[in-house]
Image: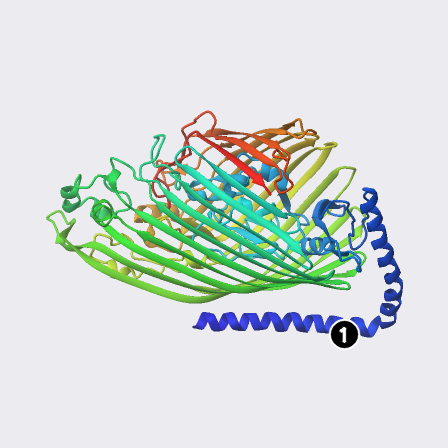
Amino acid sequence: MLVSRLSFLLACSTVCTTAGFLFCIENAQAQTASTGTVQAAQTVQPTSKKKIVGEKKALQTSTSTSTSTSTSTSTSTSTSTSTARSLDTGRGRPTGQETVSIQPGLASTPERVTVTAHLDRARSELQPDTGATVYRFDRQALETIPGGDNAPLNQVLLQAPGVAQDSYGQIHVRGDHNEVQFRLDGVQLPEGLNVFGQALMTRFADSMSLTTGALPSEFGFLQAAVVDITTKNGTTNSGGIASVYGGARDYFLPSLQYGGHKGKWDYFATADFVHDRVGIENTTRSFNAVHDLSNQYHFLGHLRYTADENTRISFIAGVSNAEYQLPNNPGQQTQFSEPSYAGSDLAQKLNGSVDSASLNERQKQITDFAILALQKEIGAFSLQSSVFTRYSSLRYSPDELGDLVYNGIAQRAARSVFSTGTQHDVTWHAAKDHTVRFGFQVFVERTISKTDSTVFGASGVDEDGNPTFDPTPIKVYDGSGKTGTVYGLYAQDEWTPLRNLTVNYGLRFDGVSEYTSEKQVSPRLNVVWKPWKGATLHAGYSRYFTPPPFEVVSSSALYKFANTSSASEVMQNSTVKAERDHYFDAGIQQQILPGWRVSFDAYYKLANNLIDEGQFGAPIVLSGFNYRKGQVNGYEVSTSYDKGPLSLYGNFSWSRAIGKDITSAQFNFGQDDLDYIRHRWIHLDHDQRWTASAGAAYSFFHRSWHPLRVSATMVYGSGLRADGDVPNGAVVPQYATFNFAAVQTFKNLFGHSFLGNTQIRLDVTNLFDRTYLLRDGSGIGVGAPQYGLRRTILTGITQSF
């Protein structure tokens, strides 16, 4: 009830704030430029008529023209939609999709031309990346990667520099754990229980970017990287596509998408179903995992209404539902059990009574989200106001007997988090050389955790002082819930004192009131300089404030498990605090030849209360904790070449991530580890020293009706951390995997006006069948071992209509 009331208040505040802002701006413009408005109206009207006549002529003569003005108006001779990409020369970045939708009118009325190019560009300019490092995936790049739209989102992001692979679909960017924020059309989604790379699908994206480095002040909360997905819509993706994809390991993935536009409305929807036996990484070296079936379905809908050339309303809704079997590891006895139980007489007596290869552990994850956004331009002002909501839940079902014998506890767990909030971003072109941006975000979140556990009760101690347990199990129930808020506001100015110099400076204020109550004012500064042709140098400093993930902060009532087989060795549970960082970044990009660029970037982070996460039980859910001090530093080198049908790229990076003194959620660790780490630096469990990726693609017969595209990618990792003589003191073996894809397209193969192109594809993952470890089951906060996917051959057919 409290969350619903707060949601209502947030929605009301959004409407009132936006309406008030628009009212003030429109009144100010009406008072200062009423005469100019009348004159403009008189001069614009004949121009509009001339433009329509020109468009008719262009359609009749099958010629096309394209002009670039302040409103980025363009015309096209295509049947319904044309797409062009413009480049912001001031910052050297794409400014968004320019779309022109032409709808033929009736015989007595002229064609209606709805131009949305400047709205797309304005939305991009609301969130500048001045001084940050950006890696972009356009639609062609997404289709070229092996798997295309069928590839998991985390596998696509691995092709960016500085991104390391981990188990459960996790990625680590520049030595951070999971501090990656996901945005849909510029609106940040609240964090959920499952890794978002598994809830968002590549097929949702028309294009995508990964932004890292010293971020400008509009980016807050999660700041290791920002993944901004420009979703497909009915204007740029009109028509339908049906696909069937599958192959090894019972892989079956049918999908369907359809989009269109009519008048001022455009709509798009896509859905898929995934069935396979590789839902979670294999715990053994075997070709196929034991007990690893998964069923998933995903949906995304996008509806937009363009009221006029300065106003657009959009609604996005998505659903992800996934059910997993947890892979078994044959020949094991204990995994997550506490030392007091693992060495007890009862554990020894039960040894072998249950085969760990026949366990039946399952987990279900659900994510639902919705975004309602208003985009508006008024003179020198441009804004986007949005309200959003997200529900995420996780349910773990144990093997009742097996988990009890194997771990000393069989726990049925249910966790959920409901988030709702609002985000407002405003751009003001205050002067020729000053662009001011400001805005705020507020999240209201409600998390609920319930567990039903079966454990053995302690019956005393033996003659050596070791605990003994009653063989009759007992039940322990636990539940908790909490409502909290996260908020932030920012202001910044992008100043261009010289033609080749841009300075972006600003302030951000963030606060959190959940399990911890903290706040911070954070300055940001970025400088971009273009000293000679083709070269761009950047340097920046950002102060970061990262609230602890609300949904993974453990609130276990430790006393309920005292004197049981699940009693913690350490009975301390200090609150997880917000992370506070000083972040420095500098780099250079140089265009060597047309189509060939090279870049170098270096970064350094000093952290207080560095947040890390680990898996400390059978449910695949992460629990957060703090290192009192942390350091992350590294560098990246990237190059790419694109010309004609050939595309090449390569990235490699070096990184070091260390921490000292665990100061929260101590009950998850052994006393020996806590004592060692208290005064010594250790590598973080996700620290990978060397990471590399590369890819190549070539299109044969690209001017014919049957083009063939062949592509290959490579991912290299020097290995994540494992326990050695000291915690996280060893490294799992290095690996390199290669993937291959061939896509044959037939243009209008069936010669029917209703049907479009037909596409047949072949994808091979891990082409040389390399057996490699992602995790060996040891390390701070690491659960079971996980191996990378063995060779997998998949094929598919896609038909557009």
Residue lying furthest left = 463
| Quadrant for the N terminus in the image | bottom left
| Depth order, front residue of 794/342 | 794
x, y percent for residue 328: 30, 39
Q: Tag 1's secondary structure?
A: helix
Residue located at (79% from left, 56% from top): 433
Q: Mark 1 points at which residue?
A: 27
Image coords of residue 728 (percent x, y): 39, 40
Query: Residue 22 vs residue 404: left or right?
Result: right
Q: Is residue 59 above or below residue 10?
A: above
Horizontally, residue 536 falls left or right of residue 777, namely: right
Quarter of the C terminus within the rendering? top right
Residue lying at the far top in this picture: please name it: 768
Please tell me which residue lies in front, 796 or 691.
Answer: 796
Q: Can residue 66 be seen in this view?
A: no
Name the one closer to the observer, 695 or 64: 64
Asked whether residue 756 is in view, the answer is yes
Q: Quadrant of residue 13?
A: bottom right
Q: Which of 262 and 290 is in front in this view?
A: 262
Percent across and percent down for residue 195 are 46, 49
Q: Residue at x 60, y 69 (%)?
A: 14
Taking 343 as reference, is 431 above or below it?
A: below
The spot of residue 444 in percent (x, y) is 49, 66
Horizontal side of residue 458 vs 104, given as left or right: left
